[in-house]
Each structure stands twice: as C-alpha cells, then as structure tokens.
Image: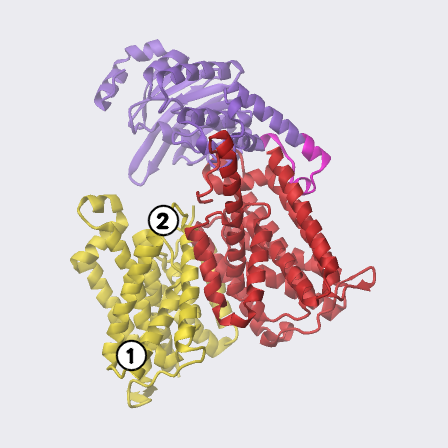
Chain colours: A purple, B yellow, C red
Amino acid sequence: MLTLQNITIKFGGLTAVNEVTAAIETGVIFGLIGPNGAGKTTLFNIISGVYAPTSGTVLFNDQNITGLPPYKINALGISRTYQNINLFSKMSVLENVMVGCHTQSDSGIFASVLRTKAQQIEENTIKRKSIEILEFMNLADKVNYTASNLSYGEQRRLEIARALASAPKMLLLDEPAAGMNGREKEELSETIRKINAKGITILLVEHDMKLVMNVTHQICVLNYGKKIAFGDPEQIQKDENVIAAYLGGGIDV
Amino acid sequence: MVIQLIIGALMIGSVYGLVGLGYGLIYKASGLMSLAQGDMLMIGAFLGLTFYKHLQLPFIVALLLTMLIMFSLGMVIQRVLVTTLLKKGAATVYVILCTISISMVLQNVAMFAWGTNVMQFPPIFKKSVINILGYDLVPENLLALGVAITCMIALHFFMTKSKFGTSMRAAAQDPMAASALGINVPVTRGASWGIACMLAGGIGVVVGPIFGVYMSMGSMIGQKAFAGAVIGGYGNMYGAIVGGLFFGFVETFVSAYLTSNYKDFISFAILILVMIIMPTGLFKEQVME
Amino acid sequence: MLNKIKTNKVASIAILLVAAVVAVMLRERYLALILCFICINSIAVTGLDILFGYTGQVSFGHAGFYAIGAYTSTLLAKNFGLNPLFTIIIGMIVSMIFGIIVAFPAAKLVKHFLSLLTIAFGQMVFMFVSVTDKLTNGYSGILNIPDVSIFGYPIKSNQAYFFFLLIITGLVLLFKRNLINSRVGRAFIAIRENPHAANGIGINVRFYKIVAFAASAMLTGLAGALYAHLVGFISPDTFMATQSNLFMTMLLFGGIATFLGPVIGSAILVVVTELMQSLVSYQMLMYALFILAVLFYLPNGVVGIAKWAKEMLTTKRQGKSRVNTTEYHN
C-alpha cells in the first residue's frame, strides 16, 4: 500500500532521515519505533506531505505522492493525528469531526450560501456520519462540548475521530498514547484493532513498547534517521541492534 | 540638480531608515509589530518644537530632552499596555490593533495640545542656504542627514559593543537562554520599544524644520519607513536602513522625473511587488509560513 | 447547535420587525439616514467579519474595497447612464476581483505582513482616487450621483432607501449564516483555528483564504456602492485608512465571529458618532478608547457580554461552564 524508497531529508547540515526504505502492506498495523530524535515524526511529516524529502520517493498504491501538499495527500486517503494535539480548539467536538469530512463532501460556495436541497442533504449525511464516528470512538456524550474542554485522553480520541472522518485507507497515528493512563491505553489498543478490522491500514509511532508489541503486526526501528531493524514484534524484541540502540538511548524495552 | 536630488533622497531615505529601524528592533526583540512609529515621530517633532521655540532651549538640548521623553514613552507603552495584553493571551494581531489605537490617541492628544494647524519650526541655522563646492544646499537637510547617520552608527556600536546592547540581542535570539543567563528579558524588550520610539521622536525634531510640524505628519513617513523595513528584510536593522534609503531614492527621483502625483502610489506598488516576488526581503528574513 | 440557530433566527426577525416599525413611524429624514448608515456599515463589517472573524485573516485596508465599490458604481452610473441597481452589482463584482488579486499574495503571508499588505493596498486605492483627477475628480470628489430606481421608480427619500437597505442587509446576514454553517464556513474556521491541521485534514488552505477574501471584498464593495447612491456624493476623504480602522473597531466592539456582532457594533459606533457630532475633535480618541476597551476588557465585544450573561444564568442551573467568554478569539 505504502512504499518508501530511499527517503532522505536534510535540515541544514543535519540528516534527520537517512536512506529509509520500507513497504507497508495493505491491512497491517505497522509500528514505527526508535529512541527520541530517531526521525519517526519527521518520516510521518514526509508521508503526510508536511515536508518534501531531499531525495527518495513515497508511493501510495503505486502513485507517486512525494512532495504533494498535505491536503492532496489527505484526499488520496492518508489521514493522520499529531503528537502535539492539533484540534480546532474553539469548535465543538461534532464540528471537529464534521471538518474532517471535508474531502468526503463537495458542496460549493454557492450551494452553501443558497442552502440548496443537495447541500442540506449532504450536511445531514455529514452530521450523521460524524456522530457515528464519535460513537465508535466513545465520544458520543461529548458531541456539543468545545474541543478544548475535553480531557487529554478524550482529545487524543477526538483527533483519531477527526482523522477517520476523511474515510482514510491508511491512518498515521503519532504517539496516540502519550499522556494516557493504563486503562486508557488498553482501550486505545482495542480501538486501534477495531479500526484495523474495518480494513484501514495503520502506521503507528509510539513510545509505549508494551502497546506497540501488543498491537502491531510488523515493526520498523529507526535510529539516528536510519532503519536498523524490521520484523514482527518477537523478532524485534530479540534483535541485538535494537536493544543496543535503546540502551544507548536510555529507554528500556 | 542631480546632486541636490541625491542629498534630498539621502535625507528622506535615512529618515525612513531610522524610523524603520525601530520597527525592526521591536520585531526582533518581541516578535511584535507597532504601527505607532509614525506618530511617535510626530509627537517628537511637537515636543522638540515646544522646547526649542517656546522654552527657548538650545537645539541640542531640545533634541536630547525629546529623545529621553520618547524613550520613556516607548518603555511605558511596552511595559504597561503590551505586556498586559500579552498576559491576557491576546494574539499578535491584537497588539497591532493596540498600537493603532495608541497612534489615534497620540494624534488626538497632539491636536488638543498644539492645535490642527501646520506649525513652523524656527530655522536652526542663520543661513537658509549654504554653498558647498558650488552647490546650494539647505543646512537643515544636512543636519537631518547627519543626525540620522549619527544615530545609526551610535546604535550599531550600542548593539554590538555595549553590554546592554549585547544582552538585548541575546534576549531577542533566545529569550529562554538569555533569561537563564541572568538577562532581564522584560527590561530588554521594554528598552527595544523605548529605543524605537526614541529614534522616531529624535528624527521628528530634525525633520520639523524641513516639513513643518502638524498632526498627521507622521502617518506617511511611518508607512514608508515600514515599507523600507519590509524590503530590507523585516527584523534586520541594516536592511531597514537600506530599504528606507531605497524608498527615499524612489520617491525623490520618481517625483522629479516621472510624476509627483503618483510617487506614493508607486512606492506602495513596489512594496507589494517585493512582498510577492521576494518575500524574504533583501536580507532574507522569514515572512511566509 | 439547533437551538443557537433558532435563537439567532428569532433575534434577527425581531430586529428586522422593530426596525421596520421604527421606519414606518419615522417622519425624520435624519433618523432614516442614520438607520441607512447602520445598514451600510453592517454589510461592510459583515464582510470584514468573514475574513477576520471567521478565517483569521486580518485586513487593515477594507476602506480600499469600500472605495472600489463606491467609485465603480458611481462612475458607471454617471458616465454611462446605467441603472444604479445594475452598477451596484458591477461595483460588487469589481471589488471581489480586487479581493482575489490581493488574496493571491496575501494567502501566503504571515500575520504581520498580511497587515502591512492590506494597509498598502488601502493606501494605494486611496492615493489612486485622490490623484487621478480625470477619472475621479480627485480630492473634490463626485457630486450628484444618481438615485437607485426599481422598475423605473426612483428611491429618493431616505425612508424608502432604508427599506431597500433593510432587505439587502437581511439577505446578506442570511447568506452569511448559511455560508458559516456549511462545509465552506467550517473550512474557514478550521483555518483560523489551526491552518496546519486544516491542511492535514484535506482543506486547501490557500484556496479557502482566497474565497474568504473574495466574499469579504464583495460585501464591503457592495456597502461602498450603496453608500455612494445614498449620500449622492463621494470623495477620497471617506476612504482614508481611518475608515478601515473604523470597520475594525465596529467589528471588534460588536463581537467577532458572531451572527449579530457586526450589526450591533455598527449600530453603536454610528449612533455614538452621530451623538458626538458637536465634539468631532474627540472622535478619534473615542474610537481608540473603544478599541482599547475591547482589547483589555471585552475580547468578544458586546455579544460576548450577552453570551457571558446567558452563561452565568445557565451555569447557575447546570453548575458547569462550557463556554469561556473571557478567552480571546485568536
């Protein structure tokens, strides 16, 4: 589904991602791990179009999407969440998800101004769909809350809900468990599996090793911008390079 | 003819440059924008006029006294109004709005204190024209040019050589680190607004004899200075001077050889073009997202 | 959500009714004129609200669009004898085109530079109409602008013009509400709240910024054209930078990104300006104090106070606050 070929990105003299090659198959939950500063989020930003790589190509379903702007990449079916929550904080929970439906609807300016029949029907569909997604993400009782008034864990879930609203084929989750307590993390693992069961491929960056090992099918490990290991969770846990990297980075597996 | 034009362009250009430098200073130190610089110049001109004409103080005393008052005014505005506003969580656009209302207040205060008429600034020199190398030059123009250049050089050495200037630059570059090193960041920020106002007010005193002193004298100079600061690369002190000089030359030569009616129109058109074509300015400062 | 729309509807219908009744009772040309000014400013400020309040793009140059609408309509009606009803529409479209032209570079600029670009635009329009004597008669302005006529009946009295304006203002507010509560409006607000996330969620940020500029310029241009045909005289003085700041003051004071904020702000500022006719020299100071009051004490304007009061009442019942009105709408 997603193929990364020799992706390199340099900021000034610093090489943040170095010659990374990977292939993510349709339907898997793919983990991307590595110590702090390994280039995981940078790689996410390249896939989602925030940065254009210095060299290398990103293929999505055999289409070259390297350097496309984020809004086009989203329209093609790659949706993401952010490490630092990036919600529309003054909008309601429902509106946040409805904005997410942007690429799934096409009412134009004139239809909107004049409130045509088709536009109203579309609005209702969007609203119904958004509420369904919120129910799925267990946020149905918070529909009318202002996004900034949600708890931290709820805001993370709302980010996922908003990303799901654009009906993605592939979902990029950037540290979705950050700041969550144990119970919330368990629920999150469950949610990730449920999303995957809907046929959405998931690329997951996460620091919580228990969660990653528990939920992913395949894992790619980055260190200093380079890919150092690839395999299923069991292989990764035994991999000496990975253990060395994590010990060096000061994080225990 | 050309020599007089060049002197005129240099004079007005360095006025723009010096006022524009203030915008850059404020931006560098606090990431904010003040739109009150032009009216600071106007207030400075009125203060200078009052000290020189009505209180009969020597010109240099009038100039220094004005600059001192303007420095305090700038400092107070930053410490009292801007800081309070930022503490309330206002976005930068609201600070711009705040400075717009400050400039309205300043204009109205000037109107109450000094009236709406154009006031003549009494000549500073006995001769109205002096002859240098066969060219007739207005000494007040030379004075303005001289004061502007002196201020620029003084500021350059203040920022690079003095301890306070260095800490101002450090605070502008990385407030957190500067703060950790024991630099009083709020004071350096206040000082940058103070210096910006001081420069504008001081230059107001020296342009008073050239343009006359009136309520709205600052608005066009302020905007041109701003344009210069952008063209030079916003936030870059030296760029602001180059940009200011550029506009000084553009408007002087456009009005001499092309059209005097459209000189300001052309200046702003150039500004917009530069923002589109070369958004980082001559000295490459970030303006795009 | 639904409740909010309902109360808005009720409120707007009530206001229209009251205004209509007042107008019928009006014998005074002067009062009708003030109501006309309120309508015209409401339209212009609604335009600014779409851009600044909802999309988060600042403009300190809306007097430029106001001028373009006014001069386009005036010149066409006067020089070619076209029906003002028709030229007003053309004025609106020309203003919109200029909005798009300004938006192209503007949509890429960071806040500070956007402020500057819009100031420069406003100044350019002002200078152009001031010095292009052949076209605009320069500083002396244009006199005897023809009245609007509908089906051959000229609208001469201020009272009649007020009804005409009332209908237009009503339509503008209706269209604005529809736009804001739609996919396009949500894209605007998303851009204001977080342009990066908006881009990531599939919104073409630059395109929607241009749309917002176009809609905003169109409404302000419409207001300018309506102004010209109401007063019958235009000169550059009306379109100085002060006018842009006045629009901004009205918007902030009424309350940004609200349905009735622009109307309330316009009404208060127009009335206060009229009441202070004898104290013209204090006018600028007053506007400045209005802005400062909003900045320091009422970040959400008059509408913010109303919401806050309502919130206070409901929190007493529910014991939980959901809307924080002292917060800035950044």
Q: Earlier in the sequence, mark 1 or mark 2?
A: 1
B32 on left or right of C155? left
- Taking A199 as reference, is C309 above or below it? below
Determine the residue positioned at 35% across, 11% down. Answer: A233
Element on which disc 2 rests: helix
Q: Quadrant of residue A104?
A: top right
Dominant SS type (magenta): helix
Give the residue type at disc 1: Phe
Q: Chain of mark 1?
A: B
| Amino acid identity at mark 2 | Leu
Picture quarter with the N terminus of chain C: top right
The reply to whether residue A70 is in sight is no
**Residue B136 drawn above or below residue C34:** below
The quadrant holding residue A213 is top left
Question: Where residue C218 sits: x, y (%)?
Answer: 63, 54
Query: From which residue to which does the magenta span run?
Result: A103-121
Compared across the picture, whether B147 is left or right of C149 comes to left
* Residue position for label 2: B86
Q: A182 or A6: which is nearer to us? A: A182
Q: Is residue B215 left or right of residue A75?
A: left
Q: In 3D space, how far apart are the residues under numbered discs 1 and 2 (Cα atoms)? A: 35 Å
The circle drawn on residue B51 is 1
